[in-house]
């Protein structure tokens, strides 16, 4: 299994590996890129069960790429340039496993690595799509949209309507598609076309959260696209006790049930200084308790740096409004922690009643698994369209109005999700419903468990035979 850079890609792929091991008796090798060998990643890989091992590809030279190249370009280039090294790793694995190499799975930016798997004669080649069916539908339609949409997506006069999907306003469409002159746009179109080389696409989503595209993509493919299997929600629920987690968890232990808004922007997300300050004041104004994972602002160094290494480089508290940390600490209303929090443990805690999230798909799934209603504050990647489908579509989140992200609006949205009797109550009820559906799908005989069993059956009926 090939994990392209970012904990948000590695974590769900590792969950898939663990599930294949525990449910289907498989062993898996996670292959990572040299550029992502952070302490966070090393610790994570070391914590995996013995059936899931890992190895790293050798470094590749990306120094010819322009400074400020988009994260999607960096990942795609790194993957494409690693195909020869990956081919020899796969050939080695074939040798050492005595021909029992059943399948190769690459994640969403790893489509070019399917060439390595083909060259190495790995019979089953799949894409694992760690985000959702809306984003996958867009990716699969990209080659034709590239040919038919002549303007920039952000200038589309009407929201984009794709089969089964919630209409997405142009400016909310996948960030790397927003500037056609940027090489990352071409890369995305390339990946969308390349997905058709896969035998199957495994998606970390479930029918209840996006019933429209689920219905369409689960139909037998008439247009030669690979079969799509929603196998989620696979989340990383780490039950181990870790001293580092005590600060957050002990603070939560002292708060009333469902009283705390958890605020976090994923493994690499950060706000511009001005928005960070408004968020601080908005949280204070909301009168709700909160636990906020604070990162150095995005206008202080490249977002990509954060993404590749989840540790903030500078003291993030220095950018908060004067006296904020002292005030919230003194009143006990809030806890701010730098860089990283044990997110799934926080979401699972009885004191957590809301999640202000950047709508990274792992975060969304984790929130749904633990039944936590969301405030959507999307930043990049596919997060804005996730926010649209969550708020306008299934109704599991309220979005902070994009045009006016001032402290008043922030406070009002936070209060509504935590305690509101109108839209907030509807969101809380919907999330409780989705929590149930998610759990049912993963049980034996549930939709997600059955989908994964079908995939594995496809791998094992060919029994690791390799192409000549
Ligand atoms: N995460 C965490 N603690 C943090 C921030 C993130 O444990 O302080 C985890 C989170 O639980 C999720 C992943 O990192 O599993 C973030 O993935 P997501 O898809 O939400 O966002 P991305 O990092 O890709 O932007």
Image: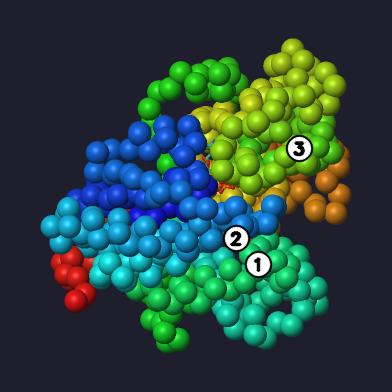
Relative image position of residue 129 (x, y in whole percent): 46, 61
Residue 206 visible in rendering: no
Q: CA distance from mark 1 to mark 2?
A: 7 Å
Label ID, residue 105: none
What residue did someone put label 2 on?
73
Q: Secondary structure at mark 2?
A: helix
Q: Is residue 294 above or below residue 176?
A: above
Q: Tell me which label, 1 or 3, sits earlier in the chain.
A: 1
Q: Could you give the CA–CA distance between mark 3 and mark 2, rounded to whole angstroms?
A: 22 Å
Q: Earlier in the sequence, mark 3 or mark 2?
A: 2
Q: Residue at x 31, y 70 (%)?
A: 119
Residue sitting at 69 percent across and 75 percent down? 160
Q: Nearer the viewer, residue 366 or 431?
A: 366
Instruction: Give the image location of residue 234, x and y in percent.
Output: 41, 50
Picture quadrant of residue 278: top right
| Residue nearer the viewer, 32 or 226 | 32
Identify the colour scheme used.
rainbow
């Amino acid at each position: 299994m090939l994990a392209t850079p970012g904990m948000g890609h590695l974590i769900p792929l590792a969950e898939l590996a663990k599930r294949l091991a525990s449910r289907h008796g498989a062993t898996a090798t996670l292959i990572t890129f040299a550029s992502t060998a952070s302490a966070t990643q090393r610790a994570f890989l070391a914590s995996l069960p013995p059936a899931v091992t890992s190895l790293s590809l050798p470094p590749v030279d990306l120094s010819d790429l322009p400074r400020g190249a988009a994260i999607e370009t960096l990942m795609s280039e790194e993957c494409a340039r690693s195909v020869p090294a990956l081919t020899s790793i796969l050939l080695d694995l074939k040798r050492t496993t005595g021909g029992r190499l059943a399948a190769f799975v690459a994640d969403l930016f790893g489509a070019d690595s399917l060439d390595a798997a083909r060259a190495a004669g790995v019979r089953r080649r799949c894409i694992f799509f760690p985000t959702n069916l809306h984003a996958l539908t867009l990716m699969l339609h990209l080659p034709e949209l590239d040919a038919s949409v002549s303007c920039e997506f952000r200038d589309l006069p009407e929201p984009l309507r794709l089969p089964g999907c919630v209409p997405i306003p142009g400016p909310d469409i996948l960030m790397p598609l927003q500037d056609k002159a940027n090489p990352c746009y071409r890369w995305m179109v390339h990946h969308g076309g390349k997905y058709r080389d896969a035998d199957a696409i495994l998606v970390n989503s479930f029918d209840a959260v996006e019933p429209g595209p689920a219905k369409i993509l689960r139909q037998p493919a008439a247009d030669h696209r690979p079969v799509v299997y929603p196998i989620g929600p696979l989340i990383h629920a780490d039950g181990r006790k870790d001293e580092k987690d005590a600060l957050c968890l002990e603070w939560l232990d002292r708060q009333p049930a469902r009283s705390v808004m958890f605020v976090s922007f994923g493994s690499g997300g950060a706000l511009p200084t001005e928005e960070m300050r408004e968020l601080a004041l908005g949280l204070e104004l909301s009168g709700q308790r909160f636990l906020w994972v604070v990162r150095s602002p995005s206008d202080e160094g490249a977002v990509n740096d954060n993404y590749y290494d989840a540790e903030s480089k500078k003291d993030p508290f220095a950018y908060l409004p004067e006296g904020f940390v002292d005030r919230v600490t003194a009143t006990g209303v809030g806890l701010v922690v730098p860089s990283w929090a044990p997110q799934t443990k926080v979401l699972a805690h009885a004191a957590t009643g809301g999640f202000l999230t950047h709508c990274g798909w792992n975060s969304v799934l984790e929130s749904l698994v633990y039944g936590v209603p969301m405030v959507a504050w999307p930043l990049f990647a596919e997060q804005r369209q996730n926010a649209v489908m969550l708020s306008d579509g299934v109704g599991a989140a309220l979005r902070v109005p994009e045009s006016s992200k001032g402290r008043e609006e922030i406070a009002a949205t936070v209060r509504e999700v935590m305690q509101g009797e109108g839209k907030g109550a509807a969101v809380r009820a919907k999330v409780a419903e989705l929590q149930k559906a998610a759990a049912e799908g993963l049980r034996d005989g549930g939709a997600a468990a059955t989908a994964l069993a079908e995939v594995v059956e496809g791998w094992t009926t060919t029994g690791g035979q390799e192409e000549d």
